[in-house]
Every structure is written in structure tokens, then in C-alpha cells.
Image (tube, rainbow, N blue to C red):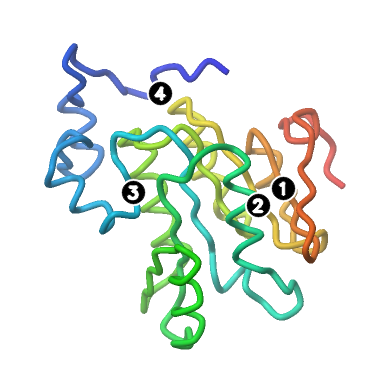
Amino acid sequence: MDRGDGPESETTPDGDATADAERRTDGATNPGADGERDRIADGETDPNADGVALFVDGPNVLREEFDVDLDDVRLAAEAEGPLVATRLYLDEHATPGLIQAAEARGFEVVVTSGDVDVKLAVDAARLAAEGVMDTLAIASRDTDFKPVVETANGYGIRTLAIAPGEFGRSDALRNAANGSVTLDGDEAVASGEEEATPDSPSS
């Protein structure tokens, strides 16, 4: 796939982002800089690595009716390449047990008292602009993430929509992404590229 340069994403010969890119990422320095490495996430993200950044919408996916295992979500993303970020977003009602279980599975847990969707979307768009991954995987059934997927596509980043189940799938999100996976209990069913294209019919 031709990644392209993305909107206004020019670099200098030594790899530093342009001033426009720095303004777009709220003053972030070159992703390889030590300050940026510390800012991104306590060892969960390698700014110099090319791989998959996984963002999980916890309140939307970890629901009793879906019976989703975080290991299955992780495996679905890892099928696309090595993980450079694994973030689970939760609200303030998350139990300590859930947080501990997620951390034991290698997730960086982000707990927010505000809107989980907004925090996840902003972080995903920021990492896309910084170019720290070549694939963005979002586990959610929320159509609101469609603009984030489209933004990442605009930067030439491959996108993957992970749905918690057949009845918890957003066709709009799936069709906006380059690929999709539907989790079905212990089974992950990957869609073909033709199913994930914007021209494909919704089921």
C-alpha cells in the first residue's frame, strides 16, 4: 500500500517534523526525541518503531453481552504486525480488578473522568500525526471513531476496525477502515479486503 505523505506531513532530510507538523501536534518535538519518548507512554510506545498501535474503547467493548477477552483483541491487532502501543481506555467506574487484569495482559490503562471516546480519539489522531505507527487498530463499535480512521488513512496509515461481535459491529467504521476483524467469543474472524472497502455493501 502506498502510504503517501499524508496531509501536510513533510519532513526534513534528517527526519525532523516540519513546523506545521509540530503545530498540529500541540508543540510536540521530533517523535524520536527523548522528551517525546517520555511524553508518549512509559515504555508502551516506541516512537521510532513501525508497527501497530492498538486503542481499545473499554466501556464500549468490554460489555457482558459481548464476552470479549482482551487477549483476543490483542491477538487480532498483532496479526497486523508488532504492537508499538496497547492502550485500554476506561472511565472512572472501572474496577481495580479490571485495571489490574488489563495491565497484566500488557495494556497501558488510561482512566479518564471525562468522555472516553474523546480522549481515545484525540490520542489516536495525535499518534497518527506523529507517525509513530504504520497501522492504527481501534477496537470499538462506535461510529464516532470514523473520522479518526479517515484521518489516519489521510496520513497513509493502514487502519483496522476490531468489532466485539457480529451484533456489536459498526458497518460505517468497518467500511472506513482498510481492514476489519469481528471477535466472536474465542474466535476472531477477519474480513477480506473487498469487504472492508468503502464501496462494499453494509450488512
Q: Which residue is mark 3?
A: 45
Instruction: State the SS at label 4.
Output: loop
Q: Residue furthest right?
A: 203
Q: CA distance from mark 3 to mark 2?
A: 20 Å
Q: Which residue is mark 2?
A: 162
Instruction: State the SS at label 1.
Output: strand
Residue type for callout 4: Gly
Residue type for callout 2: Ile
Q: Which residue is mark 4?
A: 6
Tag in front: 3 or 2: 3
Residue type for callout 1: Val
Tag 1 and tag 3, C-beta contact below 8 Å: no
Q: Residue furthest top?
A: 13
Residue type for callout 3: Thr
Image quarter in which the N terminus is found: top right
Residue 162 versus residue 90 in the image, above or below: above
Residues 54 and 128: in front is 54
Tag 1 and tag 2, C-beta contact below 8 Å: yes
Residue 173 versus residue 89 in the image, above or below: above
- Please report whichever mark, 3 or 2, sits nearer to the chain's N-terminal start: 3
Q: CA distance from mark 4 to mark 1?
A: 25 Å
